[in-house]
Amino acid sequence: MCLLCGPQAPAFGEFGITERPAQDLEGLFWEGTHEEAAAGAVRSVLKTVQARSGDLGRSLWGGSIVGVSWNTGPGRFRTFVGFERGEREAASEEAWTELALPARKYATVWHSDTDGDVVERYGRMIEWIGMVGHVRPRDGPHHREEYAADVDFDGLPMLRLMLPIA
């Protein structure tokens, strides 16, 4: 079983539940509007992190690129894109920063290039969360995404969609 797939509890239909342990990540923050993100600003950050991960000699199977986002106001959000810090003592470059994520439970689904619109899929996941009796916590990031280290960010979206649940 690959690191991105991980164990998943049985679920109704397409969604499942998984847990992620606490993680220390290093990467980059970006903040802006949904329109700026749709125009490619976040994709640029993803590519920068992917290139840096490769520069550090990380294995394609050594872990995923992780993105977590927080709402910061009407039409705005802040996102962090990074990878597991590993054994290094501090972030590898001056502009990079560290982020400690606590252990958390998530509703999740793997989204491939044939699964349609990501936002619509998140909408269905939100409906499913309520349908099975879970709630979305108000603390912490509002979502997490995981990408294979070798994903083509210029292609159709291929990623694990994750929403925190309690």
Image (cartoon, rainbow, N blue to C red):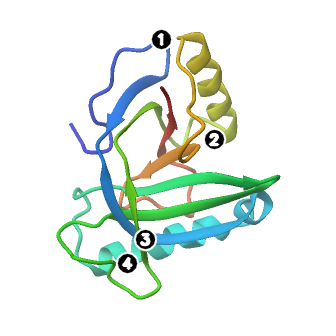
> Do the residues under discs 2 and 4 have CB atoms within 8 angstroms?
no
- What separation in Å lies between label 3 and label 2 (alpha carbons)? 23 Å
Q: Residue at x 49, y 21 (%)?
A: 14
- Residue at label 1? 12
Q: What is the quadrant of residue 52 in the picture?
A: bottom left
- Residue at label 3? 27
- Nearest to N terminus: mark 2 or mark 4: 4
Q: Secondary structure at mark 4?
A: helix
Near-viewer residue (154 or 26):
26
- Residue at label 2? 118
- Residue at label 4? 52
- Nearest to N terminus: mark 3 or mark 2: 3
> Do the residues under discs 1 and 2 have CB atoms within 8 angstroms?
no
- What separation in Å lies between label 1 and label 2 (alpha carbons)? 19 Å
Q: Amino acid at mark 2?
A: Val
- Nearest to N terminus: mark 4 or mark 1: 1
Near-viewer residue (126 or 154):
126
Q: Nearer the viewer, mark 3 or mark 1?
A: 3
Left or right position of 92 against 119: left
Q: Secondary structure at mark 3?
A: strand
- What separation in Å lies between label 2 and label 4 (alpha carbons)? 26 Å
The correct choice, above or below, for 149 with respect to 50 in the image is above
- Nearest to N terminus: mark 1 or mark 2: 1
- What separation in Å lies between label 4 and label 3 (alpha carbons)? 9 Å
